Image: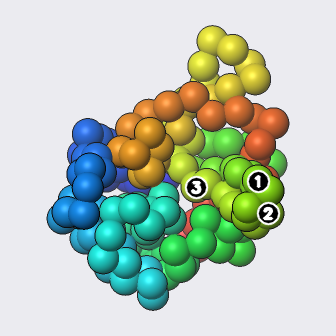
């Protein structure tokens, strides 16, 4: 099933935030898969994107806009598998609970990093290098 997550996420590559007060409609579509139902693409939307992907694959996401909510979803994996959910620590002085959620899209040439396909990465849906050192957990669906 995780490969299906990647396939769905890949179809969204290139969606990006709109500068200024006008929000990107597609990002607002993602936000409808969370209880927050944000109406601005300036609100963190990585979890909204993950919920969009998981729900469009026929599974139930977390319904939360909080990236850390994915740490309680599905089952924990000891190692990543293609398409699994990856939760990364992003805490800073302003928000000690900040996190990011992405889909595992493969290994990089540098063993300290992996490729993550996610939303709100460089203000878009894209594939970018993510550090293994920040990983809080790898998750996959718990049902067959």
Q: Position of residue 27 (x, y in %)?
A: 29, 62
Q: Which type of secondary structure does the marked residue at label 1 adopt?
A: loop
The numbered dot on residue 46 is none
- The residue shown at (61%, 65%) is 67
Determine crowd level at label 3: few under 14, some 14-19, many 20+ residues with C-alpha closer than 10 A. Answer: many
Q: Which residue is mark 3?
A: 101
Quarter assignment of residue 113: top right
Please give left or right for residue 58 compared with residue 29 in the image. Answer: right
Dividing the image into 4 quarters, which one contains the C terminus? bottom right
In this rendering, does residue 142 appear at all? no
Instruction: Examine the rendered structure and indicate whether residue 143 appears above or below residue 84.
Output: below
Q: Are marks 2 and 1 in contact (CB under 8 Å)?
A: yes
Please give left or right for residue 126 compared with residue 22 in the image. Answer: right
Instruction: Examine the rendered structure and indicate whether residue 130 appears above or below residue 8.
Output: above
Q: Position of residue 104 (x, y in %)?
A: 56, 41
Q: Are marks 3 and 2 in contact (CB under 8 Å)?
A: no
Q: Which residue is mark 1?
A: 92
| Mark 3 vs mark 2: in front | 2
Q: Which type of secondary structure does the marked residue at label 2 adopt?
A: loop
Q: Position of residue 31 (x, y in %)?
A: 36, 73
Q: Which residue is mark 2?
A: 96
Query: Which of the colour schemes (rainbow, by chain, secondary structure, one colour) is used?
Result: rainbow
Q: Which type of secondary structure does the marked residue at label 3 adopt?
A: strand
- Front one among 24 and 136: 24
- The residue shown at (81%, 36%) is 133
Instruction: Examine the rendered structure and indicate whether residue 42 appears above or below residue 36.
Output: above
Give me the C-alpha separation between circle 3 and circle 2: 16 Å
């Amino acid at each position: 099933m995780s490969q299906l997550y990647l396939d769905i996420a890949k179809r969204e590559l290139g969606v990006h935030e709109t500068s200024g007060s006008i929000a990107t409609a597609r990002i607002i579509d993602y936000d409808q898969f969370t209880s927050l139902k944000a109406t601005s693409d300036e609100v963190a939307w990585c979890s909204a994107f993950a919920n969009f992907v998981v729900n469009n694959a026929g599974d139930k996401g977390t319904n939360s806009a909080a990236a850390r909510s994915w740490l309680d979803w599905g089952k924990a994996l000891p190692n990543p598998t293609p398409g699994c959910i990856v939760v990364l620590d992003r805490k800073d002085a302003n928000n000690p609970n900040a996190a990011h959620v992405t889909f595992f899209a493969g290994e990089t040439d540098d063993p300290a990093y992996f490729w993550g396909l996610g939303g709100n990465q460089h203000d878009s849906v894209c594939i970018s290098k993510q550090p293994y050192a920040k990983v809080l957990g790898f998750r996959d669906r718990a049902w067959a």
